[in-house]
Structures are given as structure tokens and as C-alpha cells.
Image (cartoon, helix red, strand yellow):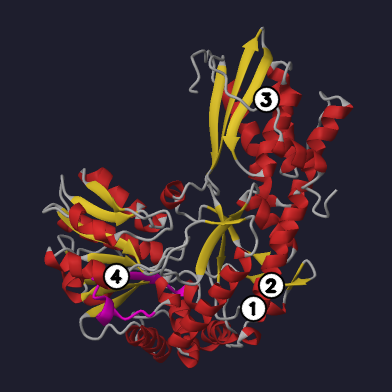
Amino acid sequence: MSEIGIYQQTILEHSKNPLNFKSLKTCTHQANGNNPLCGDKVEIFTNIKNDINDEICFQGAGCAISIASASILTKVLNKKSVQDSKNILENFIKMVENKEFNFDLLNNEEKTLLMTFSELQKFPMRSKCATMSWSTFNAALNRDNYNTEAKV
Amino acid sequence: MIDVKDQFPIFEKKIKGKNLTYLDSANSSQKPKSVIDKMNEFYSYEFANVGRGIYQLASNASEKYEETRQELKKFINCKDDGEIVFTKNSTESLNLIAHCFGEKFINEGDEIISTELEHHANYVPWHFIRKKKKVVIKFIPVDDDGNLLIDKLPELITDKTKIIAVTHMSNVTGTIVDIKKIKEIADKHNIPVCVDGTQGAAHLKTDMQELGCDFYAFSAHKMYGPTGLGLLYVKYKWLESFDPFIGGGGMIDFVSKDDVAYAKGVWKFEAGTMPTAEVVALKESINFINQIGKEKICKYEDQLKDFALETLRKNNAVEFVGSPKEQGSVFSFNIKNIHSHDVSTIFDQEGVAVRGGHHCCQILHDRLNANSSVRVSFGVYNNKDDILVLDEAIKKCQKIFG
């Protein structure tokens, strides 16, 4: 572990080899996000079947924290219901922003993964790096009846 | 060697137990004690609003306010052909020009020439005019090294071209633009030139007689002065032809229920209570620069930049964003496979302050194929030790990211 807590092995590994780093040609929900401070971009796709996230993918360009955060999002929220996903992402953003939160819907492994980002409470200027993909995913979920071909 | 670090109280502060290595002067410079003391003294014993009350305190404050204007005129050598307008910041200075010039002299179908180097502050205000008046903005291109291709300017000019808006010095690549050359081309077509001098004023020779431009926007806080104070040089002929930018107290001649007549000269553009203490304290910043000598500062910062480039070039992982032939004391780079904001966070642990991101220059970053970059910029308080600390901090990033 590096002496700067946020650059832990988990984050470095996910940033170098992100999971589900691809676009979906067709999907039920998609949204774009960007960070005006640095110009970082993210695009998130999901296929919702029977109210469950059946396949979540992302692509984009960004810092280690933003790429790792998106990668971990796809791992944690995949196969979760839309309602649970919204609850988890809200609490993830609260946790990063040093507000009261709970991860009651997560198992221990998932909790540990998300808690990696609690170090960001010490770096408020970087919180957007971690939350960008989560708020973008929220925007995707909130696009009711979205069902078109995503941009590739 | 210039050794003035001990005149800047900020360097007494430790950042995470380490000395502050401040390499972000292109963003804003630190302030010498003389400027901070002047703000304190003015607010403590000399404060009154300017240009309004006729009591002694107000009269003295007004005098000091105008003294700074006179010092600034000397500082940029604007003689009798132009004046200095005080604004909120350099961005407002550029907005003032785009608005006042655009409203009066730009019509549908006209053209504005900008460059690929511009900070958003010298592009977005012109974009407003583009939207409002349906005009075209053309860009003087840069090459892969970030040099501005002024030779392309003549072919961009048409009889519809109304103004050329260009930076004196890029805040990303440090590219120094040959304003004289642009002015020579513009003069053949009688086109005014608006210069964004935000970086130039603090780090380059800034002589309005030599540059010959019509407008020169700059800001106090980048030249060791207070924030909240922008500066704008305007040639007289424009000053008189423009309508006001903002209306209110202080900018009028007389007001009736039927009509308003505006004040003459610069006062027409200084509506409402101005950043008075800031203007008064700016005189101390100019004194600070003059005491060392602008030429000496430019040369010293240039040597620092050369030493930094020489040091960083030894590291194969450092990829420069642009490498212009004429370069001021600013440059940007990326460390291979590490994002600029991760670099900034790691640098911060070492007390090294730099800016990561696109530095309000997305067009230039797109052109130079960089998503973002780490920017290093120098002030008169920097020295070679700062560059050695920077070099070590870069190596630390490489170690963490393996």
C-alpha cells in the first residue's frame, strides 16, 4: 500500500485493468457524464431485464480514481435491482462526500471494495473523480423507457 | 539569481510538514508582504469610498486610487494614446471588450479571428457575440509543438473580419505570440487587435507603444497583487466610441426621468463601488516588480524554465504538451499513463503545488491530443531547488503507479 491511502492496490489495479470497459451496441439505458474541471468523460451502459441490471459496461477517459470507481461500480451493481442500485449509489456518493450513509444492502466483500474510496474524504477536491460515474449511472437509470441504440 | 522568497509570508507555511514548492503562478501569484501590509494599512487608517465623498478621507482615497492608474500607465508604457480601466478580473476586461465592441461594430455575417491557443476567457465572450449576432469565429492554427502559425493569418482575413482576439502568452504551452507581427498584418486591413495579456503582463515585456494593440487585458492577482481586480488598456478612440458595459452609480454625467448622460473617459466603465483597497495595494505590487526590474525577472524566470525543461527531459516518462520555440515561464506535461489529477494529488503530499486539468484551454488540449495536463509555472520567488523537488515528486508518481 502506498503512503497516500487513496492509491491502494485495489484502485491501481482497477484503473490499469478496468472491468467491463466496453460499449454496448444496444442497451436499455445509457448516459454520459463529464467533469468540467479536468475534461474527463464517462459513458455508462446497462441492459435492464425484469428490473435487474443484467449487464453494465462503461467507457471513458479519466484519472485512476474515476476509472477504478466506474470499474467497481460495474462489478457491484451488476445483477442488482434498479431500486437497490439507486440506494447503493446514493449511499456511495454520501460516503465519499463524508455524509451519513449505510451499505446495508451490500455483502462484506462489496462493502470493502466501496470503502476503499472512503480515503477520498481527506481529498474533497477529488470526490467528483469517484462520484462522476455513479451519478452518471443514476442519470441512466432515471431515463424512463429509454430503449434505443446507444452511440458507439 | 533573485532571492525574494522571504518577502512572501506564505513560504513560512508548511504543507503536510514540508516546504511549499509553489509552481502555480500562472494560475495566481503569491503576494509579497508589502502588498498585504498596504491592504491592511488602507483598511485600517485610510479607507473611504472613492470618487464620491468630498471629505478629506474620501479625497485622499480617491487620490491614491488614481495614483495606481498612473503607475500602471507607466508600467505598460501607454503614454497619451490610451487609458487603464479597472474591472473585476481579466475575464471581465475581455468580456467588456467583446460586449462593447461587438454591440457597436459587429453585425450579422461578420467574422472574428481567434486562435487555437486561447484561454476560455478570450473565446467564450466572443462566442456570446457569435450566438447573438450570427457571426463566424475563425482560428489561427497552431502546429504540433504549440507554435502559433501567424503566416496563416492573411488567408483568414476577409473584408468581413472585424477584430482579432489573441493571447500574448499561452497559459498552457507558454507560447509567446508575436503581437507586433499580428498587428502589422491587421493594420493593412485596418482591423483592431485585442490581446489577452493575463500571462504576458507578469512575465513578458509589456510595452503598449511596441505592441501597438488596441486592447490589452490583464489582472492584478497574477502580478503579485490582490484578487478581484482586473485591468484593461483601451486606446482612446475606442474608449470614446463604446457605450458603457455596466450601468449604475459613478458612471454617469447626469440622470433625469427621460434620459441618462454618461461620464467621460474611464469612469464610464467603472460603475458601482470598485475594489478600492485592491487598486491602492496594486501600486505596491508594481513597486515590487519595478524594484527588481521587469527585464531581470523575465530573464530569471526564463533560466528557471530552461533548467526545468533540461531536468525533466532526462526522464523518458515525461511527455510535454507542446514545445514552442518562443516560450515564457510556463510549460505543461504528462507523466506516461498517469492522469494529471492523480499527479497533482501525489505532488500535493510533497508540498508541490501545480495545476492539473485542461487549464481552461480545451480547444488547445484537443489540438495537441491531450485530455489534460500538469502545468508548471514560475514566479520571481522560485529557484532551482523547487525544480529538484518537482523532479523527485515526478519520480514518486512513477513509483506509486509502477
Please determine whether, in this image, residue A48 is positioned above or below residue B292. above
Q: Nearer the viewer, residue B151 or A89?
A: B151
SS assignment at label 4: helix
Q: Amino acid at mark 2?
A: Leu
Q: CA distance from mark 3 to mark 4?
A: 50 Å
Report the disc number at residue B359: none
Q: Which residue is mark 4?
A: B179
Report the disc number at residue B388: 2
The picture places residue B64, in percent across and down from the top left corner, at: 40, 88
The stretch drawn in magenta includes residue B152: no
Q: Which residue is mark 1?
A: B384
Same subunit, labels 1 and 2: the answer reads yes
Q: Residue furthest top?
A: A50
Image quarter for residue B186? bottom left
- Determine crowd level at label 2: few under 14, some 14-19, many 20+ residues with C-alpha closer than 10 A: some
SS assignment at label 1: helix
Q: Nearer the viewer, residue B66 or B50?
A: B66
Badge 1 sits on which subunit?
Answer: B
Q: CA distance from mark 1 to mark 2?
A: 7 Å
Q: Is residue A13 left or right of residue B123?
A: right
Q: Amino acid at mark 3?
A: Asn
Same subunit, labels 1 and 4: the answer reads yes
Q: Amino acid at mark 4?
A: Ile
The picture places residue B296, in percent across and down from the top left corner, at: 48, 87
- Determine crowd level at label 3: few under 14, some 14-19, many 20+ residues with C-alpha closer than 10 A: some
**In the rendered structure, which segment of residues is drawn in magenta?**
B205-220
The picture places residue A106, in percent across and down from the top left corner, at: 82, 25
SS assignment at label 3: loop
Badge 2 sits on which subunit?
Answer: B
User: Residue at image x 42%, y 65%?
Assistant: B175
